[in-house]
Image: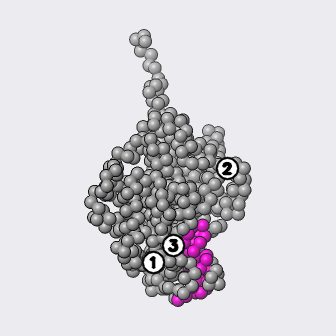
Amino acid sequence: MTSRSRCGRPAVLALVAAASTVALGTAACGGSTGSAGGTTSSRSSSSSLGLSGSITVFAAASLKRTFTRIGADFEKAHPGTTVTFSFAGSSDLVAQIQQGAPADVFASADTENMDKATAESLTAATPVVFASNTLEIAVPPGNPAKVASLADLGRPGVKVVLCAPAVPCGAAAAKVEQAAGVDIKPVSEEQSVTDVLGKVSAGEADAGLVYVTDVKGAGDSVQGITFPQSSAVVNSYPVASLKSSRNKAVADAFVAAVTSSAGQQVLAAAGFAEAP
Amino acid sequence: MSRTHRPRLGVPGWVFVPAVLGAAFVVLPLLAMLTRVDWTQFPQLVTSDSSRAALLLSLRTSAASTVLCVAFGVPMAVVLARTQFRGQSVLRSLVLLPLVLPPVVGGIALLYTFGRRGLLGHTLEVLGLQVAFSTAAVVLAQTFVALPFLVVSLEGALRTGGQRYEEVAATLGARPTTVFLRVTLPLVLPGLASGAVLAFARALGEFGATITFAGSLQGVTRTLPLEIYLQRETDPQAAVALSLVLVVVATVVITVTRRSRSAL
């Protein structure tokens, strides 16, 4: 079922309008119907050749730091443009895009979620992989359980927190376990990398599997331990402009900025590896 | 309209417009969810291993935290309603804080209290109690957010009930404990019942504090709301089906207690 059929239901629309929650109505339906006013008012026209106007970038939560930086640089390089971000889990974001959320660019933390977008022809161009990331062991400062290798995570008595297999970081952890022949019995299967990192930095867990960039971004609150088997799972980050974009020129320019050498430098500084 | 002075009681007609809109605002999302349920797959979706484990865990932990809420909440409500001391209003505000606090904040606070490196964590560990990632952590999180509901409704019942009968019992020579057990408690039983139901319902829906403090593992800490949130990642249909189960459980609990309350 598409969002259009849901939003098109007259009873729903009438009630929403009657409740005078016009803003809600456009947020839910603006992207797919195009007739709903409001969403266009904040955007200036993009018909001129010079870049201007605003775009909304839906990006994986792990890109928060780097994309905020790239966005600020982009706005500086192209005065008159505004880049707004919505950072969340890739699967949440793709679900919102499927429901007609007004996004111009989508950057996913894995190819699976980008595939969902391309499968429904929501992307305007073929997605470009712009970075990759691998797993690393995160331990609390001081490493109380003396973890030194992936095999240590299988040791009884070591409290390990992983992502749930249903979320990308958990799927990656499962693949690494398999490749290394280690059987980890986690005390908790968390919803996201942030939750894993939180349990480790609070000292609740002895170790967790997160991405290299997460360890780097967490600063002193956790310690990272690399392990050779991490190369078994390399996570690719694809980006693409979206068909629903009302400012294609700026959306495409932003994608180009991410893949440019300046953008790649920002990503590398945060610990991202180059696209494989 | 004749100018007689017979008062016409009733609600003004215009009140119905916002009232109906408000009701629609609450009911419509539930109906919208119903339209998304895949009825052919519904039985399989809600009886899968993970779903059953989550539902059972939710019912068990919510029942346990309701018992804790009654055990601690009744004395708290009595102290707040029947005594006066300096700083009482401040204490009341603090005790009721979880009502308005985002549950995630509650989870973080619990983590720094009962966690391994928390305020009491070390003491608990010496005593051989490991709260982290255990079902007990879920019960703690639920009790933390549900307790104020019981205290608020019971304190209200105690205040409106007044102290007339308690005074009579006392003048007849009944000791405070006898008055409390034989007069006070029976009089506020309906208030206590509705408070306990509210607490149970709140515990059943607890999400933020649990995921922050207790973690998420099937059969141990992954309650129904956590399972729904996780299923949404991969199987939105299962998430919708489980949401409906939670709605049904909550509705049953509320209806049953409404019935038994009016019977009281």
- The amino acid type, in three-letter code, at marker 2 is Asp
Q: Earlier in the sequence, mark 3 or mark 1?
A: 3
Q: Nearer the viewer, mark 3 or mark 2?
A: 3
For residue A74, side relative to residue A161 (left or right):
left
Parent chain of label 1:
A
Q: Is residue A34 magenta?
A: no
x, y percent for residue B170: 51, 48
Q: Is residue A150 magenta?
A: yes
x, y percent for residue A245: 43, 53
Please tell me whether residue A189 is drawn above or below residue B59 in the rendered image.
below
Distance, label 3 to label 2, CA atoms, is 34 Å
Which SS class for mark 2?
loop
Mark 2 lies on residue: B38
Instruction: Report the span colored magenta.
Output: A148-177
Question: Quick one: label 1, few (<14), some, or many (20+) residues within 10 Å?
Answer: some
For residue B199, side relative to residue A77 (left or right):
right
Which SS class for mark 1?
loop
Along the line of sight, the residue nearer the viewer: B57 or A75: A75
Mark 3 lies on residue: A236
Q: Quadrant of the N terminus of chain B?
A: top left
Mark 1 lies on residue: A274
